[in-house]
């Protein structure tokens, strides 16, 4: 290899949490199966063979439903639970939402629906004197939103990209050492670029004493700028557990740490960062639920008559959650969840096309969710994962190549953690929003194509489109807090 050639860096070794069990079951599932078989033996002895066979048959059916999994890793039991839960939701009418003066709830306001209904918004000031929005979530969580201005990777040297990725890895690793920080999220949203906003940016900065030719050129730029151009926005959301503290107390604690966290992001390629104010967060949510309001809000900014949005009025006037889509005011959205990370090693630009604007998707939002794991839990997690991988390999008569590779990867992860690396759980959500039903099929096809280029496996959030839509917003929703069954228990079924 000549000195001018450069080795391309690859990234990978992502693993899904696993536990020891028989035939694809986890620890709890295996224990439940053995208990059911023991119960059937007892019933057979005490009540007779027919009753015992009935109990064994029911246990066998449940066992089959748990081990029969599709390509997304969803068991038949989980799919049945999804469908039953959705039928109960429709029967109760909980999939419909109406707000405003004629609604029976909300005192005439447009409150947020579903998992965002109980949230509260306030504003604090950090140690740099910058105002920032403080959002109170369920279970005493508080989140803050930071706006970034990434320049993108176009015309950027690979060395610079590798440096950004390295700093980003260090930033994620440092989250596990932040006291009280339970989750983080990075949201990239692409949408139509407002010509009104362009007019405000350019014409509002023209020098009155500039030459006439220069002023004419800039005016023509605004007039001739393509109307179908898209813009990309980025937000980083940090969620803290303040253990039931009041907003003012939690705000003072977070205010002292926010400058350090935002300054560290700038070295990751996020560009100039700043905390979002309460007005910024209100506008983000208002436009997400009613995309048609974006142009009106931009025009109000240009005219200097921006309405004072309140948190109780940024929700949709009408919303209807479907099995695989979500209708809200002027938009129709579909949200996908990641079920499998890219297999093998990938380059740093693997998500480039998925994050970039697409002509068939008017508005697209991609959110990567992170849950840092502290050092004490990380050590136990990697050791349990290694034990589970070795158990599956040893319990198989002829270990498959996938089992051997799983053991190799688990050993590598354990070695990296023992060497000081941090462990982070992550997931990904994608929301595509269109304005008309006729555009939905093209948007779905576009996301499927982009998913393939990113080497991800995505699945629509069936029966939970409204909750997934809210979780994809840069508001810091922690999905594990919304589960009836804790995630640690679900992983061991």
Image: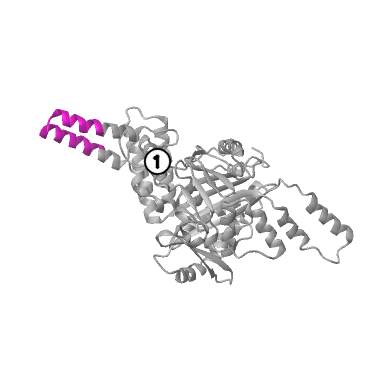
Q: Is residue 300 above or below residue 429?
A: below
Magenta region, main secondary structure: helix
Image coords of residue 148 (percent x, y): 61, 57
Residue 7 seen in the figure: no
Q: In terms of image quadrants, where is residue 316?
A: bottom right
Residue in front for this viewpoint, 286 or 10 = 286
On screen, residue 373 versus residue 3, left or right, reads left
Image coords of residue 191 (percent x, y): 64, 49
Q: Is residue 171 above or below residue 337?
A: below
Residue in front for this viewpoint, 334 or 255 = 334
Q: Residue at x 12, y 33 (%)?
A: 47
Q: Is residue 306 above or below residue 419?
A: below
On screen, residue 254 versus residue 353, left or right, reads left
Residue in front for this viewpoint, 267 or 292 = 292
The quarter of the picture where the N terminus appears is top right
The quarter of the picture where the C terminus appears is top left
Q: Residues within 10 Å of mark 1 (few under 14, many from 20)?
A: some
Q: Check if residue 37 falls in the magenta segment.
A: yes
On screen, residue 47 versus residue 270, left or right, reads left
Residue 430 seen in the figure: yes
Label 1 element class: helix
Residue in front for this viewpoint, 339 or 410 = 339
Image coords of residue 334 (percent x, y): 53, 43
- Residue that numbered label 1 is attached to: 87
Please identify the residue farthest to the right as the structure is shown. Answer: 212
Q: Residue at x 60, y 65 (%)?
A: 308
Chain part drawn in magenta: 33-58
């Amino acid at each position: 290899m000549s000195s001018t050639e450069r080795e391309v860096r690859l990234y990978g070794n992502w693993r899904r949490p696993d536990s020891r069990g028989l035939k694809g079951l986890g620890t709890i599932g295996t224990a439940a199966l053995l208990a059911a078989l023991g119960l059937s033996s007892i019933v057979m002895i005490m009540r007779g063979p027919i009753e015992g066979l009935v109990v064994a048959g029911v246990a066998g059916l449940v066992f089959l439903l748990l081990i029969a999994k599709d390509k997304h890793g969803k068991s038949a039991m989980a799919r049945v639970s999804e469908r039953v839960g959705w039928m109960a939701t429709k029967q109760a009418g909980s999939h419909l939402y109406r707000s405003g003066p004629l609604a029976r709830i909300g005192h005439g306001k447009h409150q947020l629906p579903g998992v965002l209904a109980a949230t509260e918004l306030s504003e604090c000031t950090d140690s740099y004197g910058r105002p920032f929005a403080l959002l109170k979530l369920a279970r005493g969580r508080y989140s803050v939103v930071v706006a970034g201005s990434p320049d993108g990777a176009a015309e950027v040297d690979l060395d610079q990209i590798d440096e950004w990725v390295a700093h980003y890895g260090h930033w994620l690793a440092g989250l596990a050492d932040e006291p009280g920080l339970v989750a983080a999220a990075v949201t990239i949203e692409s949408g139509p670029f407002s010509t009104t906003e362009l007019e405000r940016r350019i014409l509002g900065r023209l020098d009155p004493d500039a030459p006439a030719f220069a002023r004419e050129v800039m005016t023509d730029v605004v007039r001739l700028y393509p109307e179908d151009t898209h813009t990309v926005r980025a937000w980083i959301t940090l969620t803290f557990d303040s253990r039931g503290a009041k907003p003012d107390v939690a705000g003072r604690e977070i205010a002292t740490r926010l400058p350090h966290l935002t300054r560290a992001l700038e070295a990751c390629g996020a560009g100039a960062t700043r905390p979002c104010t309460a007005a910024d967060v209100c506008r983000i949510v208002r436009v997400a639920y009613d995309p048609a309001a974006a142009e009106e809000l931009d025009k109000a900014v240009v005219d200097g008559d921006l309405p004072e949005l309140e948190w109780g009025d940024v929700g949709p006037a009408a919303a209807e959650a479907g099995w695989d889509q979500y209708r809200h005011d002027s938009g129709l959205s579909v949200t996908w969840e990641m079920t499998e990370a890219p297999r093998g090693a990938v380059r740093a630009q693997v998500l480039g096309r998925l994050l970039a604007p697409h002509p068939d998707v008017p508005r697209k939002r991609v959110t990567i969710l992170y849950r840092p794991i502290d050092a004490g839990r990380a050590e136990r997690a990697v050791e349990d994962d290694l034990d589970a991988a070795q158990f599956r390999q040893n319990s198989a008569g002829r270990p498959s190549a996938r089992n051997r590779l799983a053991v190799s990867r688990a050993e590598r992860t354990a070695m990296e953690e023992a060497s000081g690396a941090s462990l982070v759980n992550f997931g990904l959500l994608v929301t595509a929003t269109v304005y008309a039903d006729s555009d939905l099929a093209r948007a779905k096809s576009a996301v499927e194509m982009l998913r393939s280029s990113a080497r991800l496996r995505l699945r629509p959030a069936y029966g939970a489109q409204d909750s997934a839509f809210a979780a994809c917003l840069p508001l810091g929703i922690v999905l594990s807090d919304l589960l009836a069954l804790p995630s640690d228990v679900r992983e061991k079924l």
